[in-house]
């Protein structure tokens, strides 16, 4: 659950990072072709697209975190049982 919450909370940061990496961050108004800072990009995104833009892609990120945690937990439990059986048989 904590991973899912962390994914949800950090989604706006990830959206901005992806847009900067993709070259979709707007240039500084005074100087063309100079990328804006991370915080300026975050502020622009919030002002222009609102909550929907900030949390774009949040559902898949949270879903992935939940599924990943479930798979990890199930794998751990099965492995723990198998190792216990292995040591009991010796």
Image: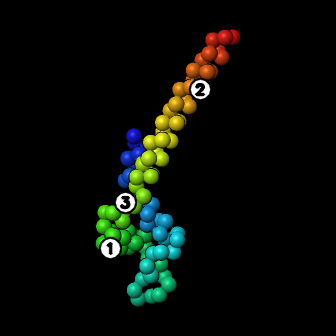
1 up-or-down from 85: above or below: below
Residue beneath the point at 62% across and 21% down: 83
Circle 1: is it few (<14), some (14-19), or many (20+) Cα within 10 Å? few
> What whole-number distance in Å separates the C-alpha atoms at marks 1 and 3?
13 Å
- SS at mark 2 in the image: helix
Distance from label 2 to label 3 (Cα)?
36 Å
Res 25 → quadrant: bottom left
Residue 86's spot in the image, x, y percent?
65, 17
The first of marks 1 and 3 along the sequence is 1
Q: Residue at x 65, y 15 (%)?
A: 87
- The residue tagged 2 is 79
SS assignment at label 3: loop
The reply to whether discs 2 and 3 touch (Cβ–Cβ < 8 Å) is no
- Between discs 2 and 3, the one toward the N terminus: 3
Asked which colour scheme the image uses, the reply is rainbow
Say above or below: 26 vs 59.
below
User: Which is more N-terminal, label 2 or label 1?
Assistant: 1
Q: Relative to 60, is 75 on the left or the right?
A: right
Q: Is residue 43 visible?
A: no
Q: Residue furthest right?
A: 90
Residue under label 3: 55
Looking at the rendered image, the quarter that the C terminus falls into is top right
Q: Quadrant of the N terminus?
A: top left
> Residue 15: horizontal and vertical position, in percent?
43, 63
Q: CA distance from mark 1 to mark 2?
A: 49 Å
According to the picture, the residue beneath numbered tag 1 turns out to be 48
| Label 3: how many Cα within 10 Å (few below 14, some 14–19, many 20+) | some
Closest to the observer, 47 or 58: 58
Q: Tell me which residue sits at (36%, 70%) in the image.
A: 45
Residue 81, numbered label: none
Residue 12 location, x and y as percent?
39, 61
């Amino acid at each position: 659950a904590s991973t899912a919450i962390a994914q949800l909370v950090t989604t706006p940061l990830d959206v901005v990072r992806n847009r900067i990496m993709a070259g979709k961050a707007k240039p500084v108004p005074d100087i063309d072709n100079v990328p804006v800072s991370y915080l300026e990009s975050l502020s622009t995104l919030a002002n222009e697209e609102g909550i929907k833009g900030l949390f774009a892609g949040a559902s898949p990120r949270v879903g992935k975190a939940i599924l990943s945690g479930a798979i990890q937990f199930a794998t751990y439990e099965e492995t723990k049982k198998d190792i216990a059986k292995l040591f009991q048989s010796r």
